[in-house]
Image (cartoon, rainbow, N blue to C red):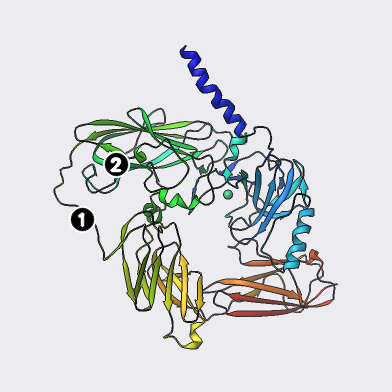
Amino acid sequence: MRFILAFVLVFPFLINAQNQYPQDYFGNPLDIPLILSGTFAELRSNHFHSGLDIKTQQRVGLNVKAIADGYVSRIKISAYGYGKALYITHPNGYTSVYAHLQKFAPEIEAYVKKHQYKKESYEIEMFPGAETLPVKKGNLVAYSGNSGGSGGPHLHFEIRDNAQRPINPMLFGIDIADSTMPFVKSIYAYPLDENSFVNNSNKKQKLRLIPIESGDYVIKNVNAIGNIGFGIETNDRQNLAANSNGVYNIQTFVNGNKNFELDFKRFSFTETKHINQLIDYEHYVTKKERVQKLYKKNNPLSIFKSVINDGVIKIEDSTYLVYKIRVADFKNNETWVTLNLKGSKNNITTPIQTKTTPYFIKADQAVNLKEGKISVDFYQDTFYEDFYLDFEVNSDTLKLHEDVIAAKKNFNITYDISNYKEADKSKLYIARLLGYNKFSSYTYTQRRGNILTASTKTLGTFALATDTIKPTITPVNFKDGQWLSKYRYLKIKIDDEGSGVSNYRATINGKWILMERDNYKDKTITFDFNDGIVTDTKNILKIIVTDNVGNNSTFESLFYRK
Ligand SMILES: [Zn+2]
């Protein structure tokens, strides 16, 4: 009887799992064995990783192939983000995505260039219909690269459902050898209110992890009282790569009962920003370590499963609890952390000091703060939690707390610049100061008359900055007046101090030419003579570069070609 019951419970689950994700439908996007430099949903800055990062042997130019029949349904090119990206929609409703590409397969490349020349823009986004660029499983569709926001050659590969939500591609049977247990780097305990303590402290505590022979860990002698949450810093390594990647699933248990689970199978792009509430954001900003909270407080993410009491542990005086954390990778290699918690009243008598300011922000209310010529607007639900905000204005400098609290919405900072000279107004922008008033970063600023507005999600210190310096334009592989008959490419470096390059426009003999800006970190733009634009012997190349406040530079050069 017991056997039958188990069978009945397990069998429908297996059928469901197989129905949900077809197993033999999709092939390999590369001709080489798949080794990952990034796993699905691993923690990145301001987002969960939406696919697999596949290593390409430190090279660009590897064949990228359609993983199944379908049609090219979207092409996007940008110097940022995904760089050159190709989307294929398959008849079963899924879409595969290939990003940071070097270039597309010839037929697709010709289609893209035609549109770039028509639109006179390197950055482009297109949605071809089902008849335009059909593909068969295994067709060459592109070459791997390092374009956009990529930090080294690799293929970023995704599978999305018909609502454009990315799903862990490994669920479709993509097999990555992994026999290594996840690694736990640190565990933190968080007293969650002023009546809660861990080891006699009301502040977060790093707990001492003791590795045991099995590869698991124990934590001994934790005294606590009240409402406690835990946080974990954990990674996983796969067999063929030395780098550490994200884990697949985390569960916690109190006295043997599951009370919390993080399940990284699928998420949506609208919720990915809530990663900043999942991690200990202040810890990340100050220490660059990502500690994931094992409790759910004020977090709308959909990846929480079986959460009891938000994952928060309530421990009373003179009670004992066994709290266990199970971390697993996709191959179900698992690592356990066992904590023995003892409920004991704290013996601290000094009251808890919370730093207060006159500006208590209630997360569910809109707030306007104004002083002098500066005004700040927080909309309703900009923050996850209520807090005391530091707000200080000193002429043109705005101290708006520190970047230790995550925001889920942009807020607006406005400066009234009517006291500036007319000629200077157009050169002003709002900058966020980094470090000790030394480095500033451009914050996208719009000007309407005497009002400058910057929109951002990052707290910190802001100031007005001036950019009067024009962009620089420097030829890389040629000189003025040269014969360039044997050249395949023209390469030029463009740069701007202050607000940064906003856009550029290049022509030869007055005709627009496509100059590719492959990766935003690389300041080189490149023209390919194979585009067939240059037919004359004597040619004038002209480039205009504009920065973010509108300063522009013009570069002109003569070259010959036969
Ligand atoms: Zn990636």
Instruction: Judge the density around disc 2: few (<14), some (14-19), many (≥20) Cα neighbours within 10 Å.
Output: many
Say what secondary structure mark 2 lies in: strand
Residue type at the position of mark 2: Ile
Q: Is residue 206 left or right of residue 250?
A: left
Confirm if mark 2 falls within 8 A of ligand 1.
Answer: no
Q: Is residue 497 left or right of residue 188?
A: right
Location of mark 1 (residue): 353
Say what secondary structure mark 1 lies in: loop
Q: Residue furthest left?
A: 349
Check the image and report above or below for 407 versus 509: above
Residue type at the position of mark 1: Gln
- Viewer-proximal residue, 281 or 164? 164
Q: Residue furthest top?
A: 1
x and y percentages locating residue 423 in the rendered image: 51, 87
Location of mark 2 (residue): 228
The numbered mark, 2 or 1, whose residue comes first in the sequence reads: 2
Quadrant of res 382: bottom left
The residue positioned 44% from the left and 85% from the top of the image is 420
The residue positioned 31% from the left and 58% from the top of the image is 387
- Viewer-proximal residue, 308 or 58? 308
Location of the C terminus (image quadrant): bottom right
Q: Is residue 533 left or right of residue 41?
A: right
x and y percentages locating residue 118 in the rendered image: 76, 67
Check the image and report above or below for 461 versus 15: below
x and y percentages locating residue 348 in the rendered image: 16, 46
x and y percentages locating residue 324 in the rendered image: 36, 32
